[in-house]
Amino acid sequence: MEATVATTSQAAPPPRLRERYEQEILPALTQKFGYTTPMQAPRLEKITLNMGLGTEKQDKRSFEAAQEQLAIIAGQYPNVRRARKSVASFKLREGMPVGVSATLRRARMWEFLDRLVSIAVPRIRDFRGLNPRSFDGRGNYSMGVKEQLIFPEIDYDSIDVVRGLDVTITTSAKTDLEAFELLLGLGMPFAQEGRPGQAEREAKEKEAEEEQLKEEARQKAEVEQAALEQLKEENPEAYAKPEGEDEGAAEGGDEEAGETAEESSDNG
């Protein structure tokens, strides 16, 4: 009797970035923006990758190489984008391929963003932070990649042409500030200058600094007053007014009052 071997297929582990979002980022966003339910918090919907061909659209070999490279980066076979109309000045005919595109959702979306933030972006030459002004006003962010070599899946010796691609991250956020906080929590390294809500934050920080200075000045005045009161209690004679000054002040007041009375009677 032949022994039968039971094979069980194991489920793939969930993306670690999605687990981090559900456990850490989602509660933080709910608390920061005061959402009544976690379903109101912004979340990722899709990531779109676009690679234009340019002058390579007439070269079949280059077109296939671009398809292959984007498939390796995205983890799925890309779609071909074709021209909708003919443009003679660009040597473009209707139906000619002009680029390749891939739309990532669910697990592939999370895994790609994890690779982008953790591995690819740190490999950008002369990197000084992502541009925080690239939001479209509706919670979506776009960034450009000049070289596909930042992705470690691409073999340096096998590429024929250095190609760039555009990455568009679509979220459910209603404002750029909410989308910015979402992507910042997911690890996107944005530059400091130009962040959404930066003017409001700077105004609040300036106001808080002024309040702190006023509070320090008030505490200093209270300490000085308390020290003065203590000195008066320890040595009251040093801070007592001479009796002659008080009497002179009183006599001067009486004389001024008499002169005022005389002037008023003369006028009458």
Image: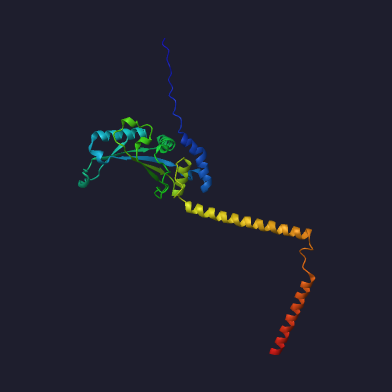
Counting from the top left corner in percent of width and height, residue 247 is at: 78, 74
Query: Which percent across, then down, holds residue 205?
Result: 54, 53
Is residue 268 visible in the rendered structure shown here? Answer: no
| Tally of numbered tags | 0
Note whether 264 is above or below 127 in the view shown.
below
Residue at x 50%, y 53% (from the top left corner): 202
Quadrant location of the N terminus? Answer: top left
Report the residue at 52% width, 43% height from top. Answer: 28
Residue at 33%, 33% in the rendered image: 71
The part of the image, by quadrant, that contains residue 210 is bottom right
Of residues 2 and 239, the one nearer the viewer is 239
Q: Residue furthest top?
A: 1
Horizontally, is 153 left or right of 26 in the view? left
Vertical relation: 211 (above or below) 105: below
* Front one among 196 and 213: 213
Which colour assignment does the render follow?
A: rainbow
Foreground of the two, 102 or 3: 102
> Residue 3: x, y in percent?
43, 12
* Residue 8 falls left or right of residue 70: right
Q: Nearer the viewer, residue 35 or 130?
A: 130
Using the rendered image of the protein, determine whether residue 261 is visible from the camera's viewpoint: yes
Q: Quadrant of the C terminus?
A: bottom right
